[in-house]
Amino acid sequence: MIKFYSSLILILFALTSCSKSYKITGVSSVSSLDGKMLFLKVAQSGKWVTVDSAEVIHGEFTMKGSVDSVQMVSLFMDDENIMPMVLEGGNIEISISNTKLTVKGSPLNDKLYSFVDKKASMDARVEDLGHKEAKMILDGVDPVEINQILTKESDQLMNEMNAYVKSFIAENYENVLGPGVFLMMCSNFPYPLMTPSMEDIVKGAPDSFKNNPLIKEYVTKAHENMQSIQEHQMLQQNEQQTSMMSQPAVANN
């Protein structure tokens, strides 16, 4: 579970009018964390910068301070990125177990982890299709019928998931969660890419979202990568056609 969240590196900013205090109280049931130092880090100029830190003692840790701007940060153990969260004013509660990581207590963290939980539930439903396929095979259902049924259900689930992600981002275009969740979804790719759904999200976004430095950087790189992929595919097709044309014709006896 921790590795899943490791891929979720969200570093975004939104200005606020004044400094606000925060207090983070955390509990952990993961025995290996006892005695370890945890760090809140934010990326600045391409580097992770520590905002706060605390030692885990008997499964508990505390951080407190003030924040001038609402920030998407990450909780680290040494150099391992454990989980994303929003650093904002108020009392924030973190819970860490072997199966689940949660942050709650402040408005944006509540919204973020409500999204994470629902998205995880949708992902589990997609994974369940594999179990359903195995059961149908054991029950002797025709393979063609299995493929038709599961393809339909998979498409419905993916459409539902894409619609949910898109609506959540749209609802949060103007705060750190909109860009943050967008980049969270992007982190699932091995390198920057743009799906049709992601293109729709960016197309319908306000300028504040489009001009976010991290969004602009990602979208630019994604378009460059996709252009390179298209050019490479065209080059391969041309080489195949040239190779076929250069082959000598086989004479009929």
Image: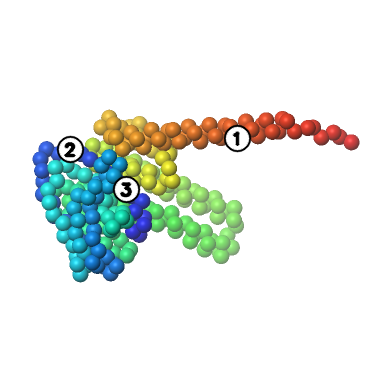
Left or right of 227 in this view: 72: left
Q: CA distance from mark 1 to mark 3?
A: 35 Å
Query: For the point 56% across and 64% down, which residue is it?
Result: 139
| Label 2 Cα neighbours within 10 Å, binned few <14 / some 14-19 / many ≥20 | few
SS label for mark 3: loop
- Against 85, residue 238 (above or below) is above
> Percent x, y for residue 193?
43, 39
| Label 1 Cα neighbours within 10 Å, binned few <14 / some 14-19 / many ≥20 | few
Q: Earlier in the sequence, mark 2 or mark 3?
A: 3
Tags 2 and 3 in contact by the CB under 8 Å rule?
A: no
Q: Which residue is identified by label 1?
A: 236
| Viewer-proximal residue among 128 and 210 | 210
Q: Could you say which quadrant of the image residue 98 lies in?
A: bottom left
Query: For the point 30% across and 32% down, which residue is it?
Result: 210
Q: Which residue is identified by label 3?
A: 9
> Percent x, y for residue 226?
47, 35
Q: Is residue 164 visible?
A: no
Query: For the point 59% across and 63% down, which residue is it?
Result: 140
Q: CA distance from mark 1 to mark 2?
A: 48 Å
Q: Which residue is identified by label 2?
A: 15
Left or right of 206 in this view: 222: right
Q: Amino acid at mark 1?
A: Gln
- Against 196, residue 99 (above or below) is below
Q: Earlier in the sequence, mark 1 or mark 2?
A: 2
Q: Could you say which quadrant of the image residue 136 lies in?
A: bottom right
Q: CA distance from mark 2 to mark 3?
A: 20 Å
Quadrant holding the N terminus: bottom left
Q: Amino acid at mark 2?
A: Leu
Left or right of 195 in this view: 44: left
| Viewer-proximal residue among 164 and 15 | 15
Q: Is residue 151 visible?
A: yes
